[in-house]
Image (cartoon, rainbow, N blue to C red):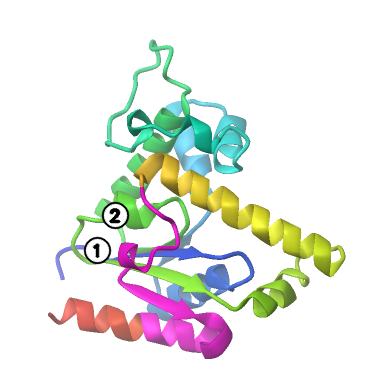
């Protein structure tokens, strides 16, 4: 195979998508990326790491500000421009890192709208991992403290943040199945079987 494979995993918090991604990367013997991407993009651009965190964390994303001009088009703004530290340029640098990595190696990556950034790239498998609400609450309670009500509020807020982030830069709907090649219910399958299902789908894709 001449071209490296990329498996992008979008996931609901509490669905175990990150765990599945790490399992899969280990099974396949390839790299796993998550938040490392923003550090790499910060290093390459020279833009403060904290600004990447603010955009990704939803601090600057507001639905009312959505317009077509914010959609990702692959262009980078130079340091002498006042738009250099704009949300759009910060996203574009993340996307550049993702694309550059795909030229060098195969990997599994979580988040960052990679399913959209690499939507036209061959040998890219786009996955969405979701789970029933009670399952997500149970899984989230193992990572964050608080009452069930507080955890549920956190999950709702995180879902909203991801929807708004995805919409701002792609114009699409984050949890729309048509944006992915494979959607998996981790609450029914379990993490190990999710990883196995992705691996099986990957083999089918590569053998077309």
Tell me where the magenta segment starts and ends, as one range: 172-198
Q: How many marks?
A: 2
Q: Residue at x 44, y 79 (%)?
A: 184
When asked about the image quadrant of residue 190, the answer is bottom right
Q: Nearer the viewer, residue 108 or 119?
A: 119
Contact between marks 2 and 1 (CB within 8 A): the answer is yes
Q: Residue at x 53, y 41 (%)?
A: 39
When asked about the image quadrant of residue 170, the answer is top left
Q: Nearer the viewer, residue 150 or 21?
A: 150
Helix, strand or loop status at disc 2: helix
Q: Residue at x 69, y 78 (%)?
A: 134
Q: Is 88 located above or below residue 37 in the figure? A: above
Within the magenta stretch, is there residue 181? yes
The residue indicated by pointer 1 is 4
| Marker disc for residue 102 | 2
Q: Is residue 13 left or right of residue 202?
A: right
Q: CA distance from mark 2 to mark 1?
A: 6 Å
| Marker disc for residue 22 | none
Helix, strand or loop status at disc 1: loop
């Amino acid at each position: 195979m001449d071209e490296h494979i990329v498996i992008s995993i979008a996931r609901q918090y509490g669905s175990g998508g990150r765990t599945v991604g790490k399992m899969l990367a280990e099974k396949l013997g390839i790299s796993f990326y998550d938040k490392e991407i923003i550090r790499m993009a910060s290093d390459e651009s020279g833009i403060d790491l904290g600004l990447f965190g603010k955009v990704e964390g939803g601090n600057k994303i507001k639905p009312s500000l959505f317009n077509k001009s914010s959609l990702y088009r692959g262009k980078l703004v130079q340091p002498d421009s006042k738009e250099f530290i704009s949300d759009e340029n910060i996203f574009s640098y993340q996307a550049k890192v993702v694309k550059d990595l795909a030229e060098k190696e195969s990997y599994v990556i979580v988040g960052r709208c990679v399913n959209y950034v690499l939507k036209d790239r061959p040998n890219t498998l786009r996955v969405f991992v979701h789970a029933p609400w009670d399952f997500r609450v149970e899984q989230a309670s193992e990572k964050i403290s608080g009452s069930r009500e507080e955890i549920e509020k956190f999950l709702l807020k995180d879902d909203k943040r991801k929807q708004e982030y995805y919409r701002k830069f792609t114009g699409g709907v984050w949890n729309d199945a048509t944006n992915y090649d494979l959607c998996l219910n981790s609450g029914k399958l379990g993490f190990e079987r999710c990883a196995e299902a992705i691996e099986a789908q990957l083999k089918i894709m590569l053998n077309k």
